[in-house]
Amino acid sequence: MLLLLTAGLCGLGGWVGFVAGRLSAMQLVGAILGGCLTWIAFWLIVTLTCGRVYCSTVCPAGTCMDIVSRLRARRLKGPMTHFSAAPGFPYLRLLALAVFVEAVALGSSTLTGWLDPYADFARLFAVWGAVTASGVVAAAMVIVVGTVTAWRSGRLLCNSICPVGAALGSISTVALMGFDINPDLCVHCGACERTCKSRCINSDLSLVDNSRCVVCFDCVAVCPNSAIRWSSSRTRLQWPLMMRTRTTAQAGGPAETSAPGAVDTCNKISTTKKTSTK
């Protein structure tokens, strides 16, 4: 996708230019501004089904950030990226999305263009067509900000500033498919957390924030125990004794939540032990 879009922005013709034009039309911000309901509906269905596939495949800015993360991994000579879990900044994401919607409503093409990841990527090539001081500065800003942020924090821009990521992330929270960690298989080695460039995995708690996940499957590849999977169902603990049970509230406090059948299982085990002791 990145190579084809780059070829199209460089002015290549033939079938390469044709395919690049179709890929350019698929870009979500352009489809929204152009009122292309077909592509809007397509990405809505894809996100509701599979999550943020757009961010990991079609968006060229996201692919460039992934390349920077790979270069960082080679520099550190370790497993992939050596990242750690980080907060998702949900309010910042909502603010970026609100600013983008307001810019579209007011017709502010400048602000909309700066918040569009594909438009930012296109700036790197537009500068060669008409070399101007403002164009060179804009392209330099995109390169410096994108490279430094991706090197230090992975997909931070995608998960905190990009309005496309904010919108798709809100939808992907209810997506049919998502990543789930089986706590019965997880050994808390932290390999998936270090590999995740979206920094959305907490290996200590065996949790994945699917609103920030870009569905790259890097975590699945490095898991030594096949504990993480992409599935439509969520794993429940195999051993009921490891789950919370309802207990008598102490000092008028609220009772703890319980899992169905957990208390009955504990009572049966206790009764069995008493019988065997007698």
Image: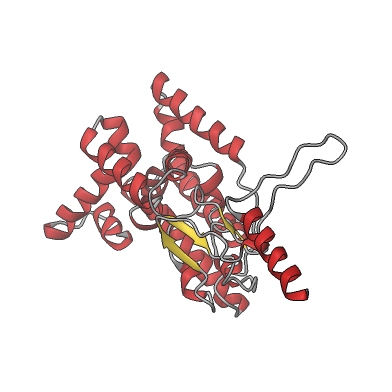
Image position, residue 233 (x, y; %): 43, 56
Question: Which residue is farthest right?
Answer: 251
Number of numbered discs:
0
Residue 224 locus on image (x, y percent) = 54, 79
Q: Is residue 150 visible?
A: yes
On the picture, is 82 further left or further right than 255? left
Q: What is the x, y in percent for residue 207?
A: 59, 57
Colour setting: secondary structure
Question: Toward the viewer: 262 or 268?
Answer: 268
User: Against 18, is 190 above or below?
Assistant: below
> Looking at the rendering, which quadrant does residue 106 occupy?
top left
Q: Quadrant of the N terminus?
A: bottom left
Question: Which residue lies at the image location 46% right of the left edge and 43% below the top edge?
Answer: 133
Q: Is residue 59 visible?
A: no
Name the image quarter holding the C terminus. bottom right
Q: Whole-percent x and y of residue 105?
A: 40, 20
Give the residue at x 28% y 55%: 5
Residue lying at the far left in this picture: please name it.
14
| 210 relative to 47 in the view: left or right | right
Residue beneath the point at 56% across and 66% down: 238
Q: Measured along the vertical axis of the image, is residue 245 above or below residue 168? A: below
- Towards the viewer: 29 or 9: 29
Q: Residue at x 44, y 27 (%)?
A: 101
Which residue of the protein is positioned furthest toward the top in this rendering? 106
